[in-house]
Every structure is written in structure tokens, then in C-alpha cells.
Image (spheres, rainbow, N blue to C red):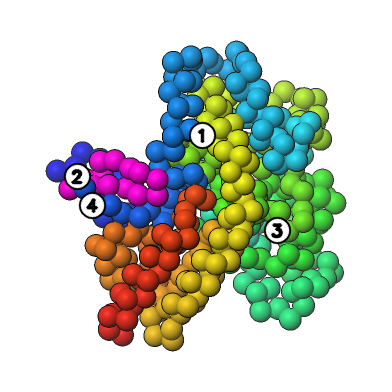
């Protein structure tokens, strides 16, 4: 009987994982499972990455934790790396442990520097597990962009549009998750987001990019907001930046740092700017650069999208969406989704199953031949599955 309480409402599908190898997880009987969800979008460079493992070993033997009154080159160099990829060269970073924390800190900073109370986000954005972002009854303005999806003017969204006029004047922060979260892979129109950013900024509000899932190269660019030609004030980064180790970062631009330094801002957390997490972040960024993984993700993404799109039939697979190496495969109903998911696991393939769709977010290091093998297996499974 397991002594682990699983708070996610998801059942444990493979109870005896014992080891890993690249994009595979192995169970106690030696069966290999191709992990096409990268854990929970975390192992951006695959499981057991040799360079990451040796960075961890080296850092553990040096020091893991010092406390927030003590810093050093490890953390400073990691901050430089993050700031260089976010384009916030003269900004600052705070290293934390989870995506939820990186978003929470950015929100608290916005409230502090703007003196405003209300946060804003899109109706389908997931922003972490804290009640401050899940309970959106007070001090939240939720922008429902459902109607904008079919809007004939979406490419030329007018700043005078009635929907945009409803945005209140006291927004402290617009938290934008560029990939319509939880794996749905739906992209709000670029012009709409540019207009929201302009409105919120004109009122003195801040723009926070939630890059917990869409960052670290996932969409074929360093960050999801790069597809929108906007510059956020803060970027919350998590998951893939630690390759499975729990580290996250809030990157803050120069102007916001300057504003922060004028007052007294306090955010206490024991594992703030820990050297172990920082060393891993630096190494993840270095590997991505050394191995040119971002342009490769863009190219592979296009090929993989074609492979997945070829599975679309009018029967079981109803839609396929993707950007970079982030894909969603819609199935006709929940029961079919569940059956296909379990059968894929039995055949050694792990994808994310969310009711009527699958999330497919392989490591950036995935090879074309692996993805080809997966889509072939998936096709044969679909062909042998009865219509409900
Ligand atoms: C879009 C998005 N934002 C934030 C989070 C929260 O990250 P974490 O689970 O590391 O706290 C998640 C986690 O799934 C996420 O998908």
C-alpha cells in the first residue's frame, strides 16, 4: 500500500519506475517507456542528462545552500545567463523552487511597485497552485478571449474594441501565459495581446510573462512571448529550466528593479537564490546554447507536427495543435482518450492525458526517429480502436 498521498487526482499509471535513460523511464522489470511529457514538462534535456548530473554532483560537493544573506559567483553567473536570454541585461533575478513561487513573487512585486490591487489574466490561464491565483473572485480581472478566437478582426484587433474598453484602470499586473495553459496549446491572437499590454502599461501596470511551461525553448524560441513581439517587465520561469530539479526564476527588468529599490519590499523564502538550483539553471542554459537546441526545436517541431497531424481522422483524433515542441492532440471523447492513453502506456509511450486531449511535450533532445516510432505506434493503435 503506497504511503504517498497523491493530491493531483491523477492515478499512478506506472508504480515501479526505477531508473531513466535519455527520453526513457524504466520500470523494475526493465520495460522502457518513452517519456513524451518530459515528466511534468520538466526534463527539457531528457532524463539523467550527464552534464546536468555532473553539475549537481560538483555543486553538492562544494555547497548547496548558504542562506539569503550570502551570495557568490555561482548565483551571479546564473543570473547573468538568465538575464541574457530574457534580454533584461541590467535587471535582476530571484531563484526560487517552483513555477507557482516565481509567479507569486512577480505578482507581489507588481503590487508593491504599482500600488494597485488588481491582477489580470486570460480566462484559460493556469498560474500555479497558490490560492492567490486560483481563487479569482476578488482583486482579479479575468479577460475572456473566447469571442476573440473567431473574431474576423483578430489580426487587426482594434484598441478601441468594446471588449478592451472593459479593462479596468487599476490593473497592477497582466499575467500572460503564451500558450493557453495546461497543455491546451491555444494561442491568443498576437494583436489582442499587444493591445492588452499597451493598455495595461499606459495605466502604469506591469506585464508578467508566465513562461513556466512555454519557456526554456519549448515553443521553438527561448520564450513563448517571443512569438508576440512584446517585452514583459518580469518573466516567471520554471519546470524545464531545472531539467527535473525543483528550481525556478523570476527575472525582473531594469526599470522594475529601480522601482523596487526605492521602497522596502520583503519576500522571505528559505531556498531563495540557493547555489545548487542556480548552478543547474546556468548549465541548462549553457547546454541549450552549446547544442543549438532552440533552432533545432523549431525545425523538429514542424516535422513532428506534420507526423501528428497525419493521425487526424474524423473518427477518434479530432484536432492537432502545436508550436515548437508543444503539442495537443484532441480526441473525440473522454472514454476514448482514457483507453488510448492506457494502451499507449502498455506499449511503452507516456503522453499527458487530460480528459479529451493529450499533451505531448518531449524533451528538446528528442530524436526524429523516436518521434516517428511513436506516431507509427499511435497510428496502429488508432486503426485498431473501435469508434465509441
Ligand atoms: C502554465 C503553468 N504555470 C505555472 C505552473 C506552476 O508551476 P509549479 O507546478 O512548478 O509550481 C504550471 C504547472 O503546471 C503551469 O503549467
| Image-quadrant location for residue 125 | bottom right
Residue 91 seen from this side: yes
Eyeballing the image, is 88 above or below 299?
Answer: above
Task: Tell me the distance, in whole angstroms, between the alpha carbons under discs 2 and 4.
Answer: 7 Å
Where on the picture, by quarter, is residue 159?
A: bottom right
Q: Name the residue under label 3.
A: 227
Q: Main secondary structure of the magenta part?
A: strand
Q: Quadrant of residue 114?
A: top right
Q: Where does label 2 land, which residue? A: 28
Q: Which of marks 1 and 2 is nearer the N terminus?
A: 2
- Residue at disc 3, secondary structure: helix
- Asked if disc 1 and disc 2 are in contact, CB closer than 8 Å, the reply is no
Regarding residue 132, the answer to whether it shows in the image is: no
Cβ of mark 1 under 8 A from ligand 1: no
Residue at the spot of label 4: 31
Percent across and percent down for residue 148 are 68, 73
Label 4: which secondary element: loop
Could you tell which of marks 1 and 4 lies nearer the N-terminus?
4
Where is residue 169 drawn, in percent x and y? Answer: 79, 53
Q: In this view, does 338 lie to the left or right of 242?
A: left
Distance from Cα at disc 3 to Cα at disc 1 = 25 Å
Image height check: is 243 above or below 277?
below
The verdict on residue 59 being magenta is no
Q: Mark 1 points at which residue?
A: 247
Q: Earlier in the sequence, mark 3 or mark 1?
A: 3
**Relative depth, front residue between 176 and 308:** 308
Q: How crowded is mark 3: few (under 14 residues within 10 Å), some or many (20 or more)?
A: some
- Whether 68 is drawn above or below 4: the answer is above
Numbered disc in front, either 1 or 2: 2
What residue appears at the point 63 percent right and 18 percent down from the top-left corner?
73
Extent of the magenta region: 15-29
Amino acid at each position: 500500500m503506497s504511503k504517498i498521498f497523491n493530491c493531483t487526482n491523477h492515478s499512478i499509471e506506472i508504480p515501479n519506475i526505477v531508473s531513466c535513460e535519455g527520453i526513457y523511464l524504466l520500470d523494475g522489470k526493465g520495460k522502457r517507456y518513452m517519456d513524451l511529457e518530459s515528466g511534468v514538462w520538466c526534463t527539457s534535456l531528457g532524463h539523467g542528462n550527464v552534464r546536468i548530473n555532473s553539475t549537481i554532483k560538483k555543486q553538492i560537493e562544494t555547497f548547496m545552500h548558504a542562506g539569503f544573506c550570502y551570495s557568490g559567483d555561482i548565483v551571479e553567473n546564473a543570473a547573468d545567463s538568465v538575464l541574457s536570454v530574457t534580454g533584461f541585461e541590467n535587471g535582476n533575478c530571484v531563484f526560487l523552487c517552483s513555477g507557482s513561487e516565481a509567479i507569486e513573487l512577480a505578482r507581489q512585486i507588481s503590487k508593491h511597485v504599482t500600488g494597485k490591487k488588481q491582477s489580470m489574466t486570460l480566462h484559460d490561464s493556469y498560474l500555479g497552485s497558490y490560492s492567490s491565483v486560483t481563487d479569482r473572485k476578488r482583486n482579479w480581472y479575468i479577460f475572456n478571449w473566447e469571442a476573440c478566437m473567431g473574431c474576423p478582426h483578430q489580426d487587426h484587433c482594434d484598441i478601441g474594441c468594446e471588449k478592451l474598453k472593459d479593462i479596468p484602470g487599476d490593473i497592477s499586473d497582466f499575467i500572460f501565459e503564451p500558450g493557453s495553459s495546461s497543455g491546451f496549446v491555444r494561442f491568443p491572437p498576437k494583436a489582442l495581446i499587444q493591445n492588452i499590454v499597451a493598455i495595461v502599461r499606459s495605466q502604469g501596470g506591469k506585464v508578467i510573462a508566465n513562461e513556466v511551461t512555454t519557456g526554456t525553448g519549448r515553443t521553438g524560441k527561448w520564450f513563448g512571448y517571443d512569438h508576440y513581439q512584446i517585452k514583459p517587465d518580469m518573466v516567471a520561469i520554471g519546470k524545464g529550466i531545472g531539467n527535473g530539479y525543483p528550481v525556478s526564476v523570476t527575472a525582473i527588468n531594469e526599470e522594475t528593479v529601480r522601482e523596487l529599490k526605492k521602497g522596502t519590499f520583503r519576500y522571505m523564502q528559505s531556498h531563495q537564490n540557493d547555489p545548487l538550483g542556480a548552478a543547474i539553471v546556468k548549465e541548462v542554459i549553457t547546454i541549450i546554447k552549446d547544442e543549438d537546441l532552440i533552432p533545432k526545436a523549431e525545425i523538429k517541431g514542424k516535422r513532428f507536427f506534420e507526423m501528428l497531424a497525419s493521425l487526424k481522422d474524423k473518427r477518434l483524433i479530432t484536432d492537432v495543435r502545436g508550436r515548437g515542441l508543444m503539442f495537443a492532440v484532441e480526441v473525440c471523447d473522454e472514454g476514448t482518450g482514457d483507453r488510448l492513453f492506457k494502451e499507449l502506456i502498455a506499449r511503452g509511450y507516456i503522453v499527458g492525458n487530460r480528459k479529451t486531449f493529450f499533451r505531448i511535450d518531449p524533451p528538446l533532445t528528442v530524436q526524429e526517429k523516436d518521434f516517428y516510432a511513436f506516431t507509427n505506434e499511435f497510428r496502429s493503435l488508432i486503426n485498431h480502436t473501435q469508434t465509441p
